[in-house]
Image (tube, rainbow, N blue to C red):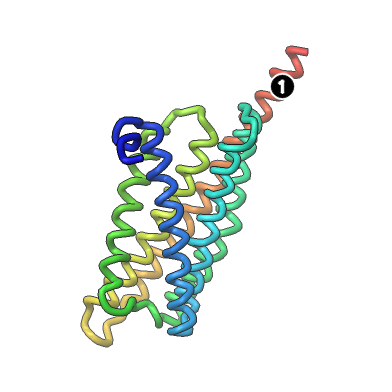
Amino acid sequence: MLKRIFNNKEYRRKTIELFSLIFSFVFGIFNGTLSIISKSVWFLMLSIYYIALSVGRLGIYYYKKNKEQNRLSSIKLYRNSGLFLLVMNFAIGVAVLQIVFIERGFKYPGLFIYAVATYAFTKITLAIINISKTRGAENYTELSLRSMNLIDAGVSILALQTALLTEFSEPGANFRIANGLTGSAVFIFTLVFGIYMIIKAQKKIKKIKRIDKNGK
């Protein structure tokens, strides 16, 4: 297996993506556990979001592996991924409201803050690299997966900022505005990005159907 990972680029990419998916799911469970312990809506929203994104990406993997792919179906998958992100953006909205009006329960216990930081930096770096590689690409199945990874990275930025400010600031310091602005930026970016995916997909679908109709 290790030899195949080092020698086969496609297999290496799929393996990394699979481990990333599993890691996101485990991280979601971890946040869910913290939400129960600390009775925090913040950790609950993070848990729901990470688990939901993991399920969404798992659906894309299943599609890639088991369904006969064609250009139209992959574009519809891309459109549905945009719809999925819009629905899940509700969790981000609730998280932002939690930050602005309740601001409590953002602290990770012990050394877990460093695990969160490692996770966030890794997700952000990989998401930027991967989305830049698919710029202008026509593989909509891959674009669906990497678009979800990009939004995952955006949420990770928000989670990391709130955790770091809580961990390393002076007792009693208030970062409600800073965290609220970052959360709002992530919410708006996800909203715009999801709408962009839907509009882009719909234009492509109409174009393909028009070509097919004229061809007949």
Residue 180 as seen in the image, left or right of residue 79: left
- Where does the image place residue 34, in percent across and percent down from the top left? 43, 78
Residue count near mark 1 (Cα–Cα under 10 Å), binned few <14, some 14–19, many ≥20: few
Q: Quadrant of the N terminus?
A: top left
Residue highlighted by disc 1: 210
Q: Quadrant of the C terminus?
A: top right
Q: Secondary structure at mark 1?
A: helix
- Where does the image place residue 194, in percent across and percent down from the top left? 54, 48
Residue 4 as seen in the image, left or right of residue 54: left
Q: What residue do we see at 60% from left, 40% from top? A: 63
Residue 160 as seen in the image, left or right of residue 155: left
Q: What residue do we see at 22% from left, 78% from top? A: 169
Of residues 125 and 91, which is closer to you in this image? 125
- Where does the image place residue 196, in percent across and percent down from the top left? 54, 42
- Where does the image place residue 188, in percent across and percent down from the top left? 48, 56
Of residues 206 and 152, which is closer to you in this image? 152
Q: What residue do we see at 37% from left, 46% from top? A: 127
At label 1, the amino acid type is: Arg
Q: Is residue 61 above or below residue 113?
A: above
Of residues 53 and 83, which is closer to you in this image? 53
Q: Would you identify the image quadrant in which residue 154 lies?
A: bottom left
Q: Residue extending furthest right?
A: 216
